Image (tube, grey):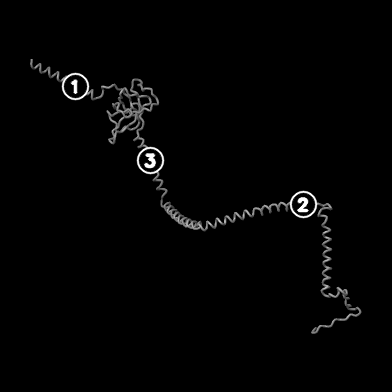
Amino acid sequence: MENRAHALVAGLFTLLLGVSVALAIWWFGGNHEATTEYTVVTRNNVTGLSLQGQVRYRGIRVGKVQAIGLDPKDGQNILIRISVDSTVPVTRATTAKLGYQGVTGIAHILLEDKGEDPTPLRADDGEPPRIGMQSSLIEELSEVGGATLRQARDFLASANQVLDGENRQRLARILANLETTTDNSNEVAIQLRQLLAPENLRLLKATLAHAERAAGEAAPLLSDARLLMVRLQAVSDKLDLLLGDPSPAGIGALAPRLNELGAELSASSRQLNRVLQMLEESPQSLVFGPPQLAPGPGEAGFVAPPANEGSP
């Protein structure tokens, strides 16, 4: 009888121990809360994400990663099955993203909802609802960093091609010319500073004042000259009309008279010249009259003039 009692006690102890272990596994496994399963779909790498990884909703821990595998229908897709607390409002606008904790590199699923579509996300055809995964910040930085590095490499290659030996010599000559130009500019600045000395500025102001005064004084003269030109133009127009008028009252009719008057003045001038010459040669003729002319050869009283001495 004692053997049977000991066996019964041992069996009851073993049974209670098994039940306790099962309860502990159930409790620590987190299956005591109501959860909903979802499938996160992504084409990006999920490095750092492992089973039992955390699922967070706006930073709050709400579930775990249950499975990670490839999509049997499309090998480019990675399917991540997660279990989320049923009280979490997962909607059609909810998106997933990989988040990393600290510097350890351990990844977790981060659910975000911008509130664009409040319709709850439901399962279709008995399969867990699917949530699209967006690129994480690290992935975006990696892509941008890679593109930047490639651009930097291309830029350096182009710079090496541009800065070859010949172009470097040209650049050196350009820098030398630029230095020379800078020196010349400094000299010009010094000369300009000397030119714009206070004494020169005073003289320049005085010259400008004199020029302004002269311009003011010349203004009336220019006005009078303009009026004179207008009057001369009027006189010229009248002379043109008189010269072109063939009537007896016109100036054209006076041309013959002016010619006759010129001829008479010329004859009178010749006569006056003869009278003046005669008065100069014999002033007594003004009282006694003109002298008689000496007889010429062959006339009575002609006397030959004496021969000059020394003539042959």
Q: Is residue 247 above or below residue 308?
A: above
Mark 3 vs mark 2: in front: 2
Q: Which mark is residue 20?
A: 1
N-terminal of the pair, mark 3 or mark 2, is 3
Kind of element beneath mark 2: helix
Contact flag, marks 2 and 1 (Cβ < 8 Å): no
Q: Is residue 5 above or below residue 288?
A: above
Residue 39 in the image, given as x and y percentages of width and height: 33, 25
In-front residue for pair 30/7 = 30
What residue occupies the far left of the structure in this picture?
2
Amino acid type, residue under disc 3 in the picture: Thr
Residue 196 in the image, given as x and y percentages of width and height: 51, 56
Kind of element beneath mark 3: helix
Residue at x-position 81% and y-position 51%: 245
Mark 2 vs mark 1: in front: 2
Q: Quadrant of the C terminus?
A: bottom right
| Circle 2 residue | 238
| Circle 3 residue | 148
In-front residue for pair 247/92 = 247
Amino acid type, residue under disc 2 in the picture: Lys
Residue 111 falls in image quadrant:
top left
